[in-house]
Amino acid sequence: MSDRDQLVVVCVEDEPEMIDLIRLILSRKGYEIIGADGGKKGLKTIRNKKPDLVLLDLMMPDMDGWEVYQQMKADEETRDIPVIVVTAKAQSIDKVLGLHIAKVDDYISKPFSPQELLDSVEQVLSKKDQADSPKRS
């Protein structure tokens, strides 16, 4: 885990209400939520903040989520940051593409329950912690 007290989550989303909802759900559990309005701003925020986790919407007007994801994975500084896609694209083909082709860490369809979001965030971050901690022999 990082040496910060709070885990930082960047929420890349073009709807301010959704950022507020996610902030409300996750800040109660002690996460620091940084909202980024749209893909271009999101990518810049991710590069500046190096968050513990990114919540990424797919459908945004300026730069779609897949483009943000590809640029993150192409950058050595940001490629290891886990990404949870949070999107209204709820078709099963979209989910398969996300989880199995693009290899995002999780895929949540809107609308989601607060518990669904929390479970996903905690599961993905615990996997990251296990990967980050040195193996003991």
Image (spheres, rainbow, N blue to C red):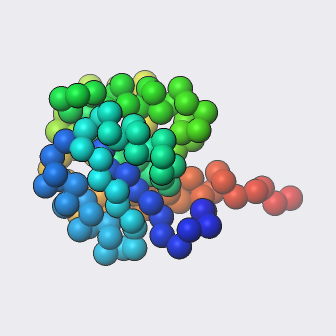
User: In which quadrant will I find the C terminus?
Assistant: bottom right
Say left or right for 99 vs 11: right
Say left or right for 118 vs 125: left
Front residue (pair 56, 106)? 56
* Residue 118, x across and y down, in percent: 33, 63
User: In which quadrant will I find the N terminus?
Assistant: bottom right
Question: At 81% from the left edge and 60% from the top edge, which residue is drawn?
Answer: 136
| Residue 112 can be seen in this image | yes
Q: Quadrant of residue 12?
A: top left
- The answer to whether residue 42 is above or below residue 100 is below
| Residue 100 can be seen in this image | no
Q: Quadrant of residue 40?
A: top left
Which residue is situated farthest in the right direction here? 137
* Residue 47, x across and y down, in percent: 48, 41
Q: Quadrant of residue 27?
A: bottom left
- The answer to whether residue 43 is above or below residue 64 is below
* Residue 5, x across and y down, in percent: 53, 73
- The answer to whether residue 60 is above or below residue 8 is above
Tally of numbered discs: 0
Question: At 15% from the left edge and 46% from the top edge, which residue is drawn?
Answer: 15
* Residue 106, x across and y down, in percent: 39, 44
Question: At 55% from the left edge and 54% from the top edge, which residue is drawn?
Answer: 127
Question: At 55% from the left edge and 30% from the top edge, which residue is drawn?
Answer: 75
